[in-house]
Each structure stands twice: as structure tokens, then as C-alpha cells.
Image: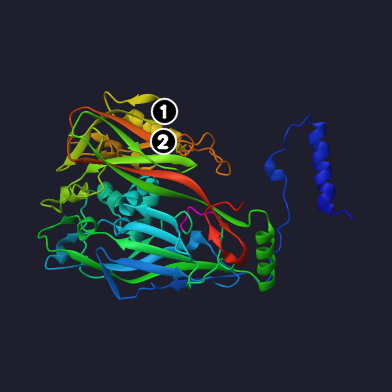
Amino acid sequence: MHTAWDIQLVEIKIFLYNTDKMALPPGLKTRDQVMGLAGVESSRISLLPTNTSGSYKENEMVTFGIPSYRFSSINTARTYLKFKIRAIGADKSRAVFAGASQVFNRLVVKNDSGVHLESIDRYHTFSRMMDNLKSKAQLEGEASMSKDWRVLKEQRELPDKSDYSTYTTVIHDLKSGILGNAQKFLVNLDIMRASSGASYTVELYLSSALTVFPETRGGMDIQYEITDVSLELELLKIPEGEQERLNSALVSSNDGSMLPFTTYTMDRRDVPDSTACNLQIASHQKDVTAIYSILSKKSKVRKVISQDLKNVFGEGDHQRFLGGRFTIVDGLATTSDTVVSQYNFRYANRSFPLSPVNMNEDSTLALANAITTFEMKDKMPYLADTLCTTDYKFIGHFETSMFLLAQNFRSVQDTRILSGLNLSSVGAPLEINIQFKNTVSDIECISFLEFSETLYIGAGGLSTLNKPM
């Protein structure tokens, strides 16, 4: 028996055929709303660390064990990390906070067998780099939660004089491919095995006090501690019968239940004191979709902010990436001692981009390559924004503190298709070729390889990154 909607669809198809396949405006074709499944509900869980100690200090670890909640899945879009932070020490009231992204220097996600599903070292550098790829509006909007005041300080030309000796509540979105906002699927917990008490284990290693509070208004006796740490999970629960039928159907399929995700691995290389370098990254990942490389000084110190302008432009921030033409000193643009004049990436007999990026006059071409290769023109990132120095010169962030060597290796942007580089195919390293304007010294290159993975979950909730045979 045909419904009125079926008849309407037939009429539309006949009309389209008679108009020689010319399309109607999409707003003319509507559908009735579908009733949701009864018994589906969402709830929020405040998950406390399994190694609860009340408070955590630099170089310590915070661990979360996510149970295999019955009939439930994680909605990662509504999940975040919450904690309170304060500076301690004789000069605690003079400490300047670098923001939530700098509190953790390593992220590890494991399955119940202890297998590392994700492991991102230099997580604080990675977090800042990814924040630079957000839009200016988003960074400004998140500032009240992340305490990353860079946009506000620069726009209003005002320093951060907050007293961080008292506890401040901070929100951080995990940059995890499985449990972070980048995961677009619901993470099925009911199907996972939790023989050790947790289906997933999340480990966060705390950064040094020097990284978290890199600037001071006077005095160097500054440490920090965090407390009231919790992983706020949004769980979607479906009726028991529906969950069991779903799990049965998934496990009985050829590949079992699958959870695709994108994650990253870090590679660090010392840059020789020279005007050029060839850095080689060894990896066996089969679908490397992108690379992000930054340059920074190896030696870092806490900087005394002798005047407000130094804090406005973040002159003491440890995550000021080098390679652009300038650095900001006392609000003025001065010539940088680490200027990249040419670069390209190479794997086997392929070059990315096809010709090296030459930057004889400025770094505009490197910025353009980063924006176009990742198709960000419709949502320009903060690193493409411009600042105004105290002598009224307009200079891009990319030229002063957010320089980035980035390349998208996907042949198509459809994430359902594996179209990245297979670094295990010929055994050759991925090369980074960089030329500098002058001889550089005390420089390191930190690279993050982005690659695709799939978590396969079979009978009994056993999970593996290797596709079942």
C-alpha cells in the first residue's frame, strides 16, 4: 500500500524526468520527521581519576579508567576534561598562566589489554599548534574556559594580571582521535571488554611548571598543582534489547565492530647548526594523511615580564614557533635569527608540494600552502590573522610566532577513503628539507604525523588495531 509521500516522490521523479533532468530547488522536497526510538536517553557522568590523590603536580600522571557501561556509548562531542589549577611557591601571585593546552605533555589511550591505541608525546606543543588552526572567533569564545587569553590581550592591548595563586577552573577538550571532538561516531562501550575494570584507559602526564607558567611579573619560585580533576562523559543509553541486537549484528559481521579514528605520532629532530638540513622520519604507518612541523628553541627559560607589552604579545610563551621573518620584542617587530627560506617534504620519488616552497621575501607562500592544502579558505585559522605592532606595522602571526610547515597527503578529502601515504610500502623515510636564510643554532624540529587507524572489536569484546583475518 502506497502512502501519500510515496506518491509525491513518484510525481517529483516524473517532473524531473520531463524537465530533462533539471533539478528542483532542494527546499521544495521535504520529509516527515521520524519518531525516535523509545527508551533512548542521555546522561552525564563525572569520571574521577583511578589514581586519586587529591591534587597533582608537575611530572605526575592522571589516569582515568572508563568502564564498559551497559547499553551505553560515549558522545564525544559533549565530553571534556575539567580541573582546577593554581600556582604555588613564594612568587605564586606573580605567575602568568599559559592556558589549559599547556598543562599536559603526553596523552595515552589504551584498551583493556594495555595496548596503546593512541600515544601523543609533546602533547602541549601539539595542542597549541592545533589551537592555532582554529578560527580567531573560536579561540576568543573558548577563552573563558581554556584561559588562553592570546586573542583578548592582543585585541585590547592589555596584559593578563590575573592572580593564579587561587584556584581557577579550566576546561580542556582532549585532542584524542578516539575520545575527543574529532571522533564523529558514538563510542560503543557496551560491546567492549573490560577485564581489568576499564574498557579504555586514559593517561595524562603533567607538564613542567616552566611550561605551564612560562612568564612571571617578578620572582622565579613558581610551581603549580591541579585538583578536582574529572573527565565529563556524555553517555547515550539505548534499550537493552536493541543494544544486544546491535552488538550481535556487529560481531557476526566479517570485520566485527569497527571504530575508525585519526590520531598522531610525534617525531623530534635536532636541527644542525647550519643553513640547511635534511631531517628523516622513520614510520611504518600505512595511511599517513598529513604532517605538521614546527621549529623552536631547545633551551627554554621563564621570562620576567618587565613591562606590560611583553605579556600582551606573549614574548615569554614557550610555544612561539620559529621560521618566520620576525619576532616581537617590546611590542616591536625585530628580525628573527631563524628564518626559513625554502622547504619541501619528500617520500621515495615523490615531493610535496611538487616544487619546493621558496620564500625569498616573506613567508606568505608557506602560509598559502598550509591553508590551501587543508582546504581552510572558508574558515581561516588564527595563524593567518594579523597583529599590529606598537609602531603601527601590520605583521601576520605566521611571520612572528605561528610559523608552520604543513602538508596534506590526501589525494581526496573524503575521509571514508584511505588516500594518504603508505610509509611501509618501500621502507623509505619521510624527509623534511629545509633551507634557512642564515646559520641557525639551538633549534629543534617537532613533527606530528597524522594517520588513520581502525579499532576492530570482535567476539567477547576483544579489541585490536589489526584487521581480523
Q: Position of residue 276 (x, y in %)?
A: 24, 29
Question: Are there few (<14), some (14-19), or many (20+) residues within 10 Å of tag 1?
Answer: some
Residue 95 relative to residue 70: left or right = left
Residue 146 visible in the current orientation: yes
Residue of label 2: 407
Disc 2 versus disc 1: distance between alpha carbons?
A: 8 Å
Image vertical order of residue 426 relative to residue 106, above or below: above
Proximity of marks 2 and 1: CB atoms separated by less than 8 Å: yes
Q: Residue at x 39, y 73 (%)?
A: 50
Mark 2 or mark 1: name the one nearer the start of the chain.
1
Q: Per the image, is 182 magenta? A: yes
Mark 1 is on which residue type?
Answer: Pro
Q: Position of residue 221 (x, y in %)?
A: 12, 63
Numbered disc 2: secondary structure: strand
Find the magenta span and give its range. Answer: 180-184
Numbered disc 1: secondary structure: strand
Residue 297 relative to residue 196: left or right = left
Residue of label 1: 353
Question: Are there few (<14), some (14-19), or many (20+) residues within 10 Å of tag 2?
Answer: many
Q: Residue at x 26, y 24 (%)?
A: 361
Image vertical order of residue 80 relative to residue 386, above or below: below
**Looking at the rendering, which quadrant does residue 298 occupy?**
top left
Q: Position of residue 218 (x, y in %)?
A: 10, 59
